[in-house]
Image: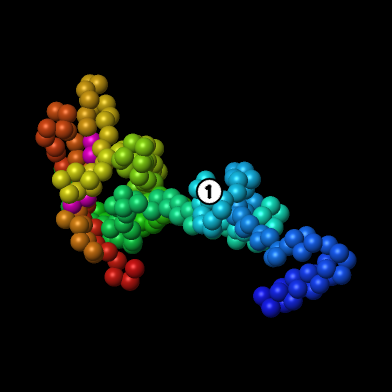
Amino acid sequence: MQRVSRLRIAAAALLALSLGLPPAAVPARAAETKIEYQCPPCPQGCDEATYDHPGKCPVCGMALVAKAGGGSAPVSATPVSAPPPAPAPAPCSGPEWKQLDFWVGEWNATWPASPGSPAGTATNRIEKILDGCVVSENFAADGPAPLVGRSYSTFNPRAKKWQQTWVDNQGSYLDLDGGIENGEMTLSMDRPGPGGTARRMRMVFRNVTPDAFDWSWEASADGGKTWKVQWPIHYARKKDA
């Protein structure tokens, strides 16, 4: 390439001499083109600035590209892509929503007789529904005029506690909340007692293993200082479940 340029310069000199022009009128070498660099087309407008060296744009971080002729449009535009944002975690995927997972399944329930109430049995089917955000309970006691009830439980991240609503075929409506207390899932509520006195009620899940646990419904007349078990139930996972 240099040899061709020299030949062109020599030919230009001979032509100048033949025309009577001074040799100084012929440039010894074509002027070198200054290479400038700029940011590729950029929404931040930093592609209007030019730089005398390659690298990254100090404003947006994209790779600078050469400008042809020192001022024309970029020869190529290969912006440095920013890493994609991390995907948002799925709703109800935190560890708190798994605190009742031990309850999920098909269960046989039994309870002993108590003053005024005979012993009894029941079945209970527990499922996670609504994309794992809600724990659904389907309780059905055996015997004549059996108790049939449903409950729905979910973790409330704003209140930082579990909340459960229970309804049944005897007209009951219970609204409980709570969480893990002393290693046991405990949900409680306040309700009027005899003579308008306040009573605190709670359910407690105890002795939890993969295939069994104990559940008890308890009452307190002194604000939770002492508790009396009113309905103890033992759960055993169905073998064919």
In this rendering, does residue 67 appear at all?
no
Residue 70 shown in magenta: no
Q: To which residue does mark 1 refer? A: 60
In this rendering, does residue 59 appear at all?
yes
Could you say which quadrant of the image residue 36 lies in? bottom right
Residue 204 shown in magenta: yes
Q: Would you say the magenta stretch is mainly helix, strand or loop?
A: strand
Residue at x 29%, y 70% (from the top left corner): 239
Q: Is residue 103 left or right of residue 138?
A: left
Q: Is residue 38 left or right of residue 166?
A: right
The colour scheme applied to this rendered structure is rainbow
On the rendered image, what quadrant is the N terminus found in?
Answer: bottom right
Residue 191 rendering spot, x and y as whole percentages:
27, 29
Residue 119 rendering spot, x and y as whole percentages:
21, 52
Residue 162 rendering spot, x and y as whole percentages:
32, 42
Tell me the SS state at disc 1: loop
Residue at x 39%, y 57% (from the top left corner): 127
Q: Residues within 10 Å of mark 1 (few under 14, many from 20)?
A: some
For the record, the magenta segment spans 201-206
On the rendered image, what quadrant is the C terminus found in?
Answer: bottom left
Q: Amino acid at mark 1?
A: Cys
Q: Is residue 170 left or right of residue 223?
A: right
